[in-house]
Amino acid sequence: MEQTLSIIKPDATAKGVIGKIIDRFESNGLRVAAIKKLQLSRADAEAFYAVHKERPFFGELVDFMVSGPVVVSVLEGENAVAKNRELMGATNPKEAEPGTIRADFADSIDANAVHGSDSLENAKIEIAFFFAQREIC
C-alpha cells in the first residue's frame, strides 16, 4: 500500500472545491489517511519548495502558496503516487486531459489547484514535512 502527499492549493480552496477534489481521490481508490487545512508561512513554503530555490519561478510559487489556506493530505492506495498524478492531470491545465482535477479546477500553470508527490521517495519526505507519524491513520 503506497502513500503520497496531496496539497489542495490556495486557488482551489478559495473556489470552494475541496470536497469535490477529495471525492475524486476517494472515488478512484485512494483513501485519506490524514488531512488538515492550514495557512503556510513564508518559511514553510520556502522550505517545502527548496528544491526549486534556484529556479526563476521560486518567488512567485512561494507568494502563491502563502496567499491563502491549503489542504494537505496523505492519500494511500495501490500505486498511490501514479494514481494521484493521473487524477491531477498535466501541470498546465490547458494540456490536462478532460476530467482531471487540473482540467476541471485549475486556472493556469501557476494556479493549478493541486500538488502531488512525484515519487515514493519524495512522498516520504513531503509527508514527513507536514505530518507526524501519529497523525496518519
Image (cartoon, grey):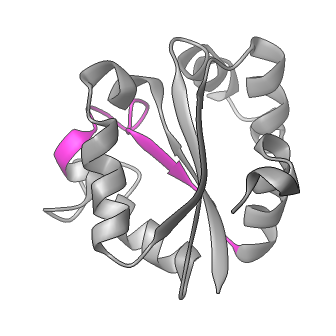
Is residue 54 visible from the viewing direction of this image?
no
Q: Secondary structure of the magenta portion, mostly?
A: loop
128 shown above or below 4: above
Residue 77 visible, this angle: yes
Q: Is residue 66 above or below residue 127?
A: above
The region drawn magenta spans 104-119
Q: Which x, y percent locates residue 13?
A: 38, 26
Residue 35: quadrant of the picture: top right
Q: Against 123, is 82 above or below?
A: below
> What residue sits 37% from the left and 64% below the top?
25
Q: Tell me the quarter of the image containing the C terminus.
A: bottom right
Q: Position of residue 37 (x, y in %)?
A: 56, 29
- Quadrant placement of the N terminus: bottom right
Residue lying at 38% horizontally and 38% vertically, measured from the top left: 113
55 in magenta:
no
The structure residue drawn at horizontal position 48% and vertical position 69%, both measured from the top left corner, is: 31
* Quadrant housing residue 2: bottom right
Front-lying residue, 4 or 59: 4
The mark tally for this picture is: 0
Q: Quadrant of residue 11?
A: top left
Is 106 part of what is drawn in magenta? yes
- Picture coordinates of residue 115, whole percent (x, y): 53, 48
Observer-nearest of 73 and 64:
73
Write the residue at 37% across / 59% down: 88
33 relative to 50 in the view: left or right: left
Location of residue 132 with respect to 45 vertically, above or below: below
Q: Tell me: 15 left or right of 13.
A: left
In the displayed structure image, the side of residue 91 where residue 122 appears, left or right: right
